[in-house]
Each structure stands twice: as C-alpha cells, then as structure tokens.
C-alpha cells in the first residue's frame, strides 16, 4: 500500500504538469528541478498519512472519515509547502501544479482505498493462530488479537484437557492429543504454545509441522510480535541467566551514543533561544529557579543529575492547565536534558530513569527490573510512547515490558521509529 500510494501521488502531480498548457514539461523537470519538488510533495503526503496511522489498519470503517483524514493530510502538506515558499527553499511546487496535482491525488487515493485496498487485504487474509494450552496469558493474548484484526492474526481455537476455566469466546477444539485433527480442519499458520510441557508430549508432530512451514512460538515470543513488549509473566529465569538476549549489543550502544551526541549538538542552535524564553517565562511566574536538578539512576546503575525546567508542577497531567499544560504536552520541560545527552549520561531514546529510592524499591518488588539500566536512560522512550497510547502511564510492570523489548531490539532504525511515534503522539497530533 505504501509503495503503490507513493507512485499514485507522484503520478497525480505528473499528470497536473502535463495537463497544464502554460507549462513546458521539459523546462519544468530539467531547469526548475521539478522532479525534486514532486518527490518532496509526495514524501510530505506519505509522511502525513503515516502520522495519521492510515497504514496501521486497512479496514474502512467510514468513507466520510477516510475522506476527512485524507483532506487533513493534504491540508498539512499545503502548510508545509507554504513554509518552504516563505523560507525560500527550492523544493515547493508551483501553485498551478500543487493544487490540481493534490486534487487528483486526493481523488485517486480515495478511490484506491475504496476499490483496491479491501481486495488486497482480503487476498492477504489474516494468519490463523492455534493455541496449545490455554493458560491466562494465552487467553489474554487470544482475546487481544480477536479484538484487533488489524494486527493480521485470527485465533481459530485452542487445545486443552477440557474447556478452559477462563472466560473466552474462543472455541475449544479438543485435547492436545487432537493436534493432527485440528491441523487438518483449520490449517493454522501459527501455533502458539501456551503450556510448555506440551512441547515434550507433541515434539514429533511439532517438529514435522515446523518443517512444513507452520510457525511455532511460545506465548512470550508471540506477545512480543503482537504488542511490541516482553510478556513479563512468560520470561524464563533460566533463559535470562544463560542467554544474552536481554543484553543490548555493544556496537548498538556505541552507535546510539554517537548519533545522540551529534543530534544534541545540531539541536543546540534551535534549542537555546527556546530554552531562554521558557526560563524567562518560568521566572516571571515563580521566584524559584527555572531549572530543576534531580538525582536519577543512570547507565549501569551509576547515579547522575538530570535537568529539567520547573514548568510542570507535581500534579497529575490531567490537572495541568494553560502554560504548564503546553510545556508538558510538547515535552519542552525536557530541553535541558540536551546537556545530559552531551555528557553521555542519557541518550535521545531509552528507558525513563528512576529516582534511586524508587529504583531500589522496584528492583526488590519486580523481577528483572534492575536490567533496565543496561542501556542509557532516554529523553523519550518506547515505553512512554506506548503508555501514551494505551493509558497505562503508572503501570511499572507494563513499563518494564516495553523497556525489555526495547533493550532486545535496540538499533538506530528502532530509535528513529520511536522518535517519529513520540513526535506524532506528543507534538503533531496530541490528544486533547
């Protein structure tokens, strides 16, 4: 969908060029850098569609809502084009190409989504999932994918020694010994092992299915695939001891330190004037210092002093109003943490650092919580982005699950994805 719609948008602008009788295509493309301008305009629209999560779910719940979303994206792209014109960048499209090209693109994408999108989704279909063993974690996971078909999976049933005591609408297909019959009837693409002792009992059949192309995972691994977080209740202590999967690669840590420092240096010219204005506003509202110093637990458990602006008072976010709400919503109180990044104490992306006394308490209460310090704490984090979406902001276990997943998958591309998601949730389209 992404590639097809990028081609469709570019073709719409090309059509606008050739339909304009007053415009010489050869002059426009060669002398006026028209190719670059069309590429930039296409990129802006595609990026806007990504931020509006139009690639997260291909289902069309309402044609009117789809049209409104596309018009909103086009409006944002128009504003971006106007800003490029104002600052004399060489990339904006001329008005007699931008307007008809965008109109053609809007109609084309809308028709494409209505006519072609559902057929692609139906052709791809949902991957069928069979559960062997139906413990509470497996039941919870089955309920989630049943309620969210956009993740691409559909549960077909479970095998257990009798109907599961947990409440579930999922069909009971018999005991694990009936695996062969269940495979013949339902042809699953995935088998999720909810009870690990069943692996030994069905090892020959499972090995044969694995070589036949059926994906086989335990509940913890499948939960990571679906939710982007580690299932804390399914973490095997023995596996955590003998495996290095929760330890980020050293190369990734060094690369993260490098690009975080470079990004902080590049941000200084823009951040300093904003920080000066914020400090002045905060001082006019309070006699206290604008800068707050807080002791936090850093990389490998080494304590450090984290800086932030005092703009956010110690109350619930929902109770913030006016200036405080503005600063909190857009994360402006974190701007002084650029200094922490430059000192190597923090990175752009990483777990949220805890206060020493809180970290000690959570380490005693929650298994594997102390592993969070194996990566540098971040100005923003994977856990923060997801907890903004699912509303579990004060759930320490859920936060740990996201942090462990981040540690296992640390990479520059993942950090870029987290930044884009944070930008979307906090800045571009924040919730009211």
Image (cartoon, helix red, strand yellow):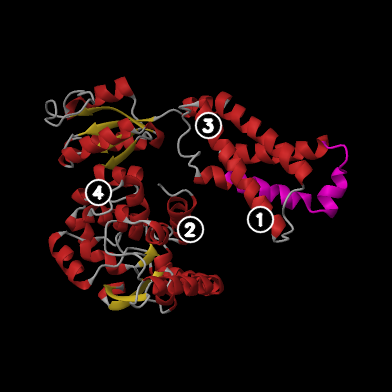
Q: Earlier in the sequence, mark 3 or mark 1?
A: 3
Q: Position of residue 202 (x, y in %)?
A: 20, 35
Write down the residue under mark 3. Answer: 66
10 Å crowding of disc 4: few (<14), some (14-19), many (20+): many
Write down the residue under mark 1. Answer: 83
Viewer-proximal residue among 422 and 238: 422
Say what secondary structure mark 3 lies in.
helix
- For residue 418, say whether it is visible: yes
- For residue 43, say whether it is visible: no
Range of the magenta residues?
Answer: 20-46
Q: Position of residue 102 (x, y in %)?
A: 68, 38
Say what secondary structure mark 1 lies in.
helix
Q: CA distance from mark 4 to mark 3?
A: 34 Å
Mark 3 or mark 1: which is in front? 1
Image quarter of residue 159: top left
Mark 2 or mark 4: which is in front? 2
Write down the residue under mark 2. Answer: 416
Q: Is residue 56 above or below residue 33?
A: above
* Residue 231, numbered label: 4
Q: Earlier in the sequence, mark 4 or mark 3?
A: 3
Q: Earlier in the sequence, mark 2 or mark 1?
A: 1
Picture quarter with the N terminus: top right
């Amino acid at each position: 969908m992404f590639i097809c719609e990028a081609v469709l948008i570019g073709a719409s602008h090309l059509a606008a060029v050739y339909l304009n009788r007053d415009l010489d295509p050869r002059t426009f493309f060669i002398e006026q850098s028209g190719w670059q301008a069309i590429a930039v305009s296409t990129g802006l629209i595609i990026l806007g569609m990504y931020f509006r999560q139009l690639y997260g779910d291909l289902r069309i719940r309402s044609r009117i809502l789809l049209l409104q979303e596309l018009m909103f994206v086009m409006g944002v792209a128009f504003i971006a084009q106007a800003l490029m014109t104002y600052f004399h960048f060489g990339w904006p499209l001329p008005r007699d190409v931008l307007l008809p090209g965008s109109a053609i693109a809007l109609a084309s994408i809308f028709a494409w989504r209505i006519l072609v999108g559902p057929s692609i989704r139906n052709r791809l279909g949902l991957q069928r999932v069979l559960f062997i063993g139906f413990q509470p974690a497996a039941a919870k996971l089955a309920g989630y994918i049943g309620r969210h078909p956009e993740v691409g999976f559909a549960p077909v049933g479970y095998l257990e020694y009798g109907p599961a005591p947990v409440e579930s609408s999922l069909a009971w297909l018999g005991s694990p010994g009936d695996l062969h019959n269940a495979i013949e009837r339902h042809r699953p693409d995935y088998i999720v092992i909810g009870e690990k002792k069943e692996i030994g009992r069905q090892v020959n059949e499972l090995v044969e299915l694995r070589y036949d192309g059926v994906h086989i995972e335990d509940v913890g691994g499948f939960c990571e695939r679906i939710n982007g977080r580690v299932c804390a209740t399914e973490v095997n202590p023995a596996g955590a001891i003998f495996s290095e999967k929760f330890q980020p690669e050293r190369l990734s840590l060094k690369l993260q330190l490098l690009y975080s420092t470079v990004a902080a240096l590049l941000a200084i010219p823009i951040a300093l004037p904003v920080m000066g204005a914020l400090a002045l506003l905060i001082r006019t509202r309070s006699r206290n210092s604008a800068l707050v110093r807080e002791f936090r637990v850093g990389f490998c458990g080494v304590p450090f002093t984290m800086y932030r602006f005092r703009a956010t008072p110690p109350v619930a976010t929902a109770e913030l109003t006016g200036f405080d709400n503005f600063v909190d919503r857009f994360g402006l109180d974190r701007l002084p943490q650029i200094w922490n990044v430059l000192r190597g104490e923090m990175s752009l992306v990483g777990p949220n650092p805890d206060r020493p006394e809180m970290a000690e308490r959570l380490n005693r209460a929650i298994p594997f919580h102390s592993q969070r310090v194996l990566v540098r704490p971040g100005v923003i984090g994977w856990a923060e982005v997801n907890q903004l979406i699912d509303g579990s902001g004060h759930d320490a276990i859920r936060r740990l699950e996201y942090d462990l997943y981040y540690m296992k998958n640390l990479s520059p591309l993942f950090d870029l994805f987290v930044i884009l998601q944070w930008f979307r949730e906090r800045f571009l389209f924040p919730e009211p």
